[in-house]
Image (cartoon, helix red, strand yellow):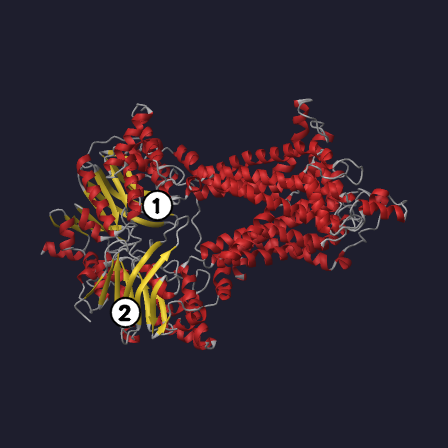
Amino acid sequence: MTRLIVKRLLWSVPLLLIASALSFVLLSLASGNPAAVILGPTASAAQLRQLTAQLGLNDPIWVQYWHWLDAALHGNLGTSLIDGQPVTTMLAPRVTISLTLVLGATVGASVLGVTLGVLAAIRGGPSGRVLEVTSVFGFAIPDFVLGLVLIEALAVAARVFPASGFVSFFQSPDAWLKSLVLPWTALGLGVMTIVAVQTRDAMREALRSPFIRVLEANGISRRSVLFKHALRSAAIPLVTVVGIVVVALLGGSVLIESVFALPGLGSALATAATQHDIPVVQGVVLYFTLIVVAVNLLLDVVYGLLNPRVRAA
Amino acid sequence: MTTVGALLDVRDLTVDYPVRHARTPYRAVDGVSLSIAPGETLGLVGESGSGKSTICLSILGLAPVTAGTITFAGQDITRATRAQRRTIGKDLQVVFQDPYSSLNPARTVGQALSEPLEVHEKLPAAQRRDRVAQMLERVGLPPDAASRYPAGFSGGQRQRIAIARALMLCPRLVICDEPVSALDLSVQAQILNLLADLQRDLSVAYLFVSHDQAVVTYMASRIKVLTPPSEGPDHEKKTDHN
Amino acid sequence: MIRRFARKPVGVAAAAWLLLVLVCAVFAPLIAPYDPQAQDLPAALSGPSGSHLLGADQLGRDVLSQLIYGARSALIGVVCAVATWLVLGVSLGITAGYLRGRADSAISRTADLLLSLPGLVVLLVVFSVFPGSLIVPMLVLGGLASAGLIRIVRSVTLTVREDLYVKAAQVLGLSQVRIMTRHVLPRVSSAVIVQAGLFAAIALVIQNGLSFLGFGVVLPNPSWGGVLGEASQVLLRSPWLLVAAGGVVGLTVLAFVLLGNATRDAWTEAWAPSQLSSAPPAGRGARAARAEGTAQAPHADTSGGVLTVRGLSVEFDGPRPVVSDVSFSIGRGETLVVVGETGCGKSVTALAVLGLLPAGARRTAGTVLLDGMDLSKCSRKELAAIRGSRIGYIAQDPMVSLDPNFTVGAQIAEAVRRHSRASGRTLPRKAVRDRVAGLLGSVNLRDPAAVARKYPHQLSGGMLQRCVIALALSGDPDLLIADEPTTALDVTIQAEILALLRRLLETRNMAILLITHDWEVVAQIADRAVVMYAGEIVEEAAAADLLAAPEHPYGRALLACDPVRALPGHRLPVIPGSVPVPGAWQAGCRFAPRCAEAEQKCSAAPVAFTRTAAGHFTRCVHAEARVQA
């Protein structure tokens, strides 16, 4: 078990390196000289040359990357090309917001999805069909459309929830929650239906195992068979599903944060990408990859705890 | 030194499987020797763990050989290359135990049976169809079976198809790895008769592997009893008939 | 396959819609009523009208035209993404799964890496680099997402490559590539087709999202994402816009998914037998059967014997009868073996006694009396209480008979606790542990405490089966039902397990109902035996009598074709033909079509039992004639 964790941790190092290197290289190929962006259109050729050299933009690309990496390991992610703020100062406060959004939506979608899926598996027949149909719809409606619709319906028209903005928990728990309900729903609804279908399939598969019949035939109650044994077997593949959900929702958060004007990593990325603000984009990619690594590690541990073959090894 | 005139000659075959995180590998077969003459049936009996399936796999090139030699039709095939296996495939075939897993469910029976013809004889389609029809009749299946998928057949019928596939090219030796162990008693008798008939008509030799002493005694002219490598040496005995 | 597909209305509808979208994309300039960028300000945000069939947007641009032209970028993007995804995913997945070794390591690690990158983020990065382009980001999306397909294809390949037909192909000398394309690829295809439908939908949704953010195809160039974004923002002022745009996108997404499902179904129906609808096992069958009974109290007077089955009949959906008019009884200290070949209905009989028939099966007639108590009149709760405490059950394959997620001891302990609770006591933990150890000891396991701590996968087949027997004994049952308990075990272990069962029978004064296809088992453990053929009992006798001189032609023919009695070198006597499938039974004797002694009167009417000797019954007209003579 500890072996697994160590292996995972070791594996995340190249992951981080490759992700950051990839984005660095791609961004550096972007048309437009960052120096020109900083100085604006009125800069002279000499000023441009000077700043370009100063920013180290004349060095070969791997040298530039090395400098960035070196600085990053010391906690310095550069400064924004647009407003000169240090990237870390810009992005650090946004991490909590993105995490709250993504993890909150994941937990909500998973809990509700699993419940629905288990119910559909137990009742069988038509409820399963209904679930399949709703899941395709959950799929078909893009989350940003859902977000915009929710805003129009429940924020603008009905004024139940705020249309945008984020309120810190410490300022007002009530307002904090209210500001997150719509984003959570928009982000998580589609995923919830998919989790429900996966759960239903996993439960059905688990219920087909021969040991279910043996246990029930020897007196174990139906309830225990369903929730203690079948659900436990079904949980193992579901852990993988949750992992995929988190990665998908991280991507979706970019859209949702933009729609709901939440100051998280996603909206920062969206803005920075349009503005070619390379250091900020680099920074967000790094943070996102760190989050994915952490979540995957956690899920691997959970998987190992659930699966006795891995645990005993 | 090989047995003169033997079709298959196995000498001191040893097969080790590496075990994860362990220094000593698992010895599945320990110094086994056997030989089969053309047209005869050698029975191979033993408990599970005695290595009889591994011996079959090694002869067929599906399991690694740690030590010893395997000679087939005078050729050393112990570590044959893929190209060599291809040539041998014409004369050395196999029938497996599980009638459900030994046929590709996504291909029709006709396609499965004509595959050996495509690979080795490169006959035109019409001739292949005829050969397939002939073989189907020989193993007691209706001619329309060629256009159906394996899912539509019972276990016994699928085993007939597997036997047909093995014998399409009139091989000289067929390894039968527990061919009737998964079948009901009445079906087993039919398949055993079929195997005996085909041997009589095509002069094919069998290496007949089974855990069922009675079946092997009935089918084989010579029997080799295997004991698991950890126990004592194995022994050979003759049965009363030819 | 096209024909099978044509029979699926949903699939056809989906294909038709997508075809329409394709036509729009290709012939946009010819079909669209307006230039998509032409503004008609007076008509801004108007709903459907004569001049604008689907209304107009904020700047008066015709929505229908925008959607028609937008189909172009939509389809191009999806095709680029799906094509990359498919080519990379399938080829790399099969290679990794089939060749294993270094190729597998390299491909799998790369796939894991790609899956950890949040796709949308990478896409935004790509868009920063190639701002106006649509194709490059979609190719990158396909590449990133292919990691998921690689994983799926690889895992299917890993299973398929162990199948014997792959080994047979290798023996034949087929090249690696040939094997991968001909034998592995078709098996992989069904999963891939469904995933392709899903991925096409995802690619479209992502593309729209990016459009909305201002990447890829942006306004004023027509795109579905752009219209959707605008529509969502003016929802209250002009809800129609969202309906039109959302409808088109939604239908296309749905169409992709449904097309994928329908194609997969059409593809696999031919060669994969359709699964029975899986609803949860148990429950329904018992409930339906109970409805037939009267409101009598379940405790009738005892007719001797632990288990008495009278006239039991079971049918599957169809309706297909699988068991007809089965009757037998077992006394204390007695072992009754039901012997028959595949498809004779013996396992179903055992499940019917337990009240655990699978979905789609139901008892249609007959009674099951346990020590006089009528099980068919028991409620579900009562039956659940009886199971384990009065009847124990062991199944065929011990390796899958226990939950792999719990230790053996934990599962037996759960049963022990349940049974003691049912009888009103709650045992303290130590008492439960002791009882578990005691049970494991009674099945001859040498170190019960150590075994109890192990997981099923850590024990051998023989040891596991003993554990299952211990579980079955935890409620101190009067009857033990064993369904082919030794079939999956070695011959020597078989003998040990049967000896164990015999000993338990004596020491606990139970009855045993054992199902098997193996006559050796009859010889080793049976007191009495019952032979089943095509859903009915054809002979019943004391084991010794049955083995020595069976009366029924089926039993006689079966014994004759056993190679043990055969003369080597001579043909084995066989029973011509094969067992009739359930439902294809004829009116009279079901064995008559294959019987060497069959006559006219055999098939004329159902044959009743004839008592040929003390305790020996046969369902055969010839036996009848012999007795009367």
Q: Disc 2 versus disc 1: distance between alpha carbons? A: 36 Å
Residue at label 2?
Answer: B35
Tell me if C551 is positioned left or right of C175 in this view. Answer: left
* Number of numbered discs overlaid on the protein picture: 2
Left or right: residue A65 versus residue C295 is right
Q: Give the residue at mark 1.
A: C399
Q: Is residue A31 left or right of residue B27?
A: right
Closer-to-camera residue (C296/B4): B4
Q: Quadrant of the C terminus of chain C?
A: bottom left
Residue at 29%, 58% in the rendered image = B181
On the same chain, marks 2 and 1? The answer is no
Q: Residue type at mark 2: give it.
A: Ser
* Closer to viewer: mark 2 or mark 1: 2
SS category of the residue bearing label 1 = helix
Tell me which amino acid carries mark 1.
Met
The residue furthest left is: C629
Residue at left 20%, top 71%? B242
Position of residue C562 relative to residue C539, above or below, is below
User: Disc 2 on helix, strand or loop?
Assistant: strand
> Label 2 is found on which chain of the structure?
B
User: Is residue C177 in view?
Assistant: yes
